[in-house]
Amino acid sequence: MLKQLSNLDGISGREDLVRSHLLECLKDTPHEITVDSMGNLLVKKGKTISEQLMLSAHMDEVGLTITAIDKKGMLKFCPVGGIDTRILPGLRVRFGADRMPGVIGVKPIHLQKKNEQQKPFDPETLYIDAGFSSEEEACRWANVGDYVAFDVDCISIGTDCYRGKAFDNRAGCMILLKLLLEDNKLNFCAAFTVQEEVGTRGALIAAYNLKPHFALVVETTAAADTPDNEKKVAGTVLGAGPAISIMDRSIMVSPQARGNLVALAEKQSLPFQFRRFTGAGTEGGAIAHSGEGVETAVVSVPCRYIHSPNSIISMWDINNTLNLARAWLEKHQ
Amino acid sequence: MKDQMLIDIVMDLTSISGISGHESAAVEKAAVYFNRYCDEIKLDRFGNLVALKKADRDAEKKFTLALVAHIDEIGAVVTKIEPGGFLRFAPVGGIDPRVLPGQAVVVHGKSNYDGVIGATAPHLLTEKERNKTVPIDRLFIDTGHSYNYVFDHIKVGDPISLSRKTCYMKEGKMLTGKALDNRAGMSSLILCAAELTGLHHQVDICFIASLQEEVGLRGAITAAYGLNPDLAVAVDVTHGDLSGVDEQHTFRLGQGPVIAVGPNFHPVLSEHLQDIAKEYNISRQVEAIPGNSHTDAWAIQVSREGIPTGLVSIPLRYMHSTVEMVAVADLVSAGRLLAWLASGMKSAFIGRLKGC
Amino acid sequence: MKKMAIDDTLKKLTEAYGPSGEEEEVRLLIKEMIGSSADNLYEDRTGNLYAIKNGGSGRVMVSAHMDEIGIIIIDVDKQGFLRLAPLGGISPHLLVGQRLRFKDGSTGTVYHEKLNSWKELDWPKLYLDIGLKGCAPDDCPVKIGDLACLDQPLVKQHNGRLMAKAMDDRAGCAVLIEVIKRLSGDLPHEVCFLFSVQEELGLRGAKTAAYRYDPDYGLAVDVTLVGDTPESPTMAVSLGKGPAVKVRDSSLFCHPQVRKLIIDLADENSIPYQLEVLTRGGTDAGAIHVTREGVPSGAISIPCRYVHSPSEIIDGKDLEMTVLLVEKLVQSCWPQIGGSSLQ
């Protein structure tokens, strides 16, 4: 399930493929399904009071978009969502509805000046080469505004881990999907939201629509358990279980909401850690401060190399996050 | 509407001051024009101008299309009166301090007072001083009046507008002046309203002149909530071509309005705008905006349960200076594009927008 | 007699523990101080406190925030030193050597690791020492996620100046409490005195409170910066010259008719005032005024030196005049503002 979700291309603003896939997975269920004007997919399981309990996971991933086509047929682009531009050189990508392949070329070492390698490539000078030999030819296949995704296939790797793109936040989507498909007797509304990466936009209108009493955002977060990052107290650790948020740029998780999750984890002997990084926003804020306010918590699956073409995530962490989310739902029925 | 009429409207709208937070005079001016073509005009609770042009009487169901252009311009406010009658000020909206020294201004106190942002004569400056930008809070305005006069006629908080008379450059058919961001957009909307008088339309059209866009899209936030239209298109300006800036970030003047695509805009609406332009032979350009468009569209899209939104922009050079430049043809095309959009809008299309 | 009462209120409020997100202690204190002076007193689920005074038609929301800047604990190391992250606009430079206090009373000081120059001073280099010798995570009196605030008593200076931490915005809260206690008789409009939460994190409490209460008018009572200290940023506001009537700050332009009402009342009642333009900084009115279809709002500010430091200084006379001005405001009829036809 994770592989399928990860391989789908769904950059902020064009989450159609992910949404269609989820709809396909849900087609034999009795749940009430709506899609709103921005493309959020809202699935209500159980009785009508289900909208009082909201689970949220965003469908979109970071990527690129084509901003211009130059005279030589090269495609100029800019990032959609937060990307460290240093990962771009040497990337294979696919763009447009037909998923045409392209590359972000790099000047060979042989032709570089001395000391050129000391500084990162200036992102303004990068472009996508799809093999077109002229502007006209390029315009037949590419359009300004086409979305560009990392051309990567998800594979299993190591012990119970996966390597691929977009685990942020297809891992979260997978958790919500499983809870919807499982044979549990839970009542809740799963919101598969759009455009989180460009400002938690979908969550704003989804929360306004549902007006939940309690919400849990299921996300992924940066793991920093790699060499030279030991001093970075702020990162999470792969294999230590779901990371419960204390605070991020969008929300101060109330001690009550946080305490609930911790108590649940302890009671059910589930492993967990804290997401101690207080920066970076999530949908937590969009939901918590909508309308008259919502008691909101955020739980995340640790993920290495997040927002890059090849992230690494542990299925063990995903399953434990799923268990914690289920426990949260059970408690709030 | 003839080109000359549009030019006159732009000249008129830019002749008045309407800096963010102090737009009433500009709003009144715009109201005069909309009054000619619309059925109802009012100010909403925030102060935004809302001009309604009702659908044809035989329209089946009530839908509302909002066309929004912000009416405010960048400027400044007085922060302190110094000895000698000089005024310290703070910017309203984003201003590059480097365009300010030597700039003529008008201070709006009890009356309007001409002034200038003082620039020290080069003879008196050291080489080192000449190589540094003077930060805004070290600049000052000289009105030529004494401290006592200033104290009696001007207060802390009074608005200050940049002074420039709009000029029509006949050969290139360009307009240049201050506040073309966004009186150019506003003028296109007025042209659109005029064009619609000769066309049928099945949706109610609300022309909105929004306030305080430059300081946080505030008018758009409240207008969208209050009106709750079925869909909306914002009209603003985008960066015109200029040397020294990569072409991927700018658009050619005279090559038509720029239709935006990206997460901020409903893909079906963006495509529809492009289709209309093709159908009516209106030259157009396309801009991919990867996130926040920094226009009213950003606020409107997430109002209440969400409003499908689009953006049409007029290429403009030297944004946020007093030498802004636009091509008349682009303003006309933008207005016509929106008129065709409104007149061709059917309820089936609106249905397509609601469920993605 | 009145003066001593408000000083006492202010002392209790500023010395209380209430960093953004944990305003409980301040809220309880305020409820106790208001006692039965409000016609209705309730809280919402985010912790905002609403004190209602009945009146005629129309609703006015007057807001002051209960929270103060502080820090949040993100790590407890093996030797018992605590790592911090900021809560609101608190600068690492102002924390070195300062005392911080937790909810349970644990107190400590902030210090920095070895630095080659002051330019290196940033959050990862700071730590808090509350006297722990190293403890097992489950056994520790302080845990990850705990909040601390500055620890300073209120002191009186020369010239009636008062110095304390959290004048921003316990001074505003003190003003509201005093006004509630003084009001008697019918008010022209219903007034909701809002004691909001999490203003320092982005006006969050006021946003949901305004949506819930749906007022017709808004007013924030907060502190503002001054321009009367050596080489200060340009500001025409000084200590001792009366409350500042806000014209604008980065969160809102005060509605001109609300501003005019405030100024007219100040003139009629011989209350000295100043005009305030704040270039960086916002207040609850910023959230209130763009709620729903918009709420005409204004703000009255108490001039304050060294805002967001452990020693914020206000002038006692300015505080009294602010109480008087707010009292007159809620006793007045607010002008009809809102949609009008332009035909």
Image (spheres, rainbow, N blue to C red):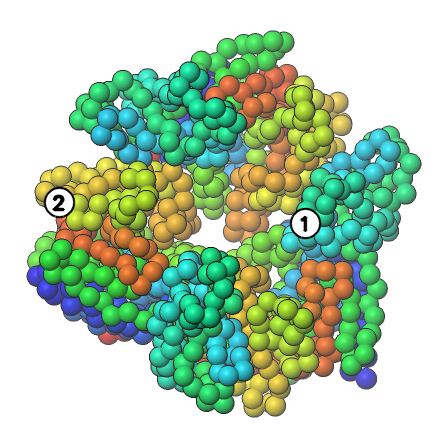
Q: Position of residue B301 (x, y in %)?
A: 37, 47
The residue positioned 25% from the left and 31% from the top of the image is A70
Q: Amino acid at mark 1?
A: Leu
Question: Does residue A278 appear to the left or right of B256 in the view shown?
Answer: right
Report the chain holding disc 2.
Answer: B
Front residue of this view, candidates B273 and B22: B22
Residue B231 seen from this side = no
Question: Does residue B329 appear to the left or right of A77 in the view shown?
Answer: left
Report the chain holding disc 1.
Answer: C
**Under tag 2, what secondary structure?**
loop
Q: Position of residue B212 (x, y in %)?
A: 40, 62
Residue C144 seen from this side = yes
The residue positioned 83% from the left and 70% from the top of the image is C155
> What residue would you read off at disc 1?
C87
> What residue would you read off at disc 2?
B282
Circle 2 crowding by C-alpha within 10 Å: few under 14, some 14–19, many from 20: many
Q: Quadrant of residue A22?
A: top left
Above or below residue B128? Residue B275 is above
**Under tag 1, what secondary structure?**
strand
Question: Does residue A229 appear to the left or right of B346 in the view shown?
Answer: right
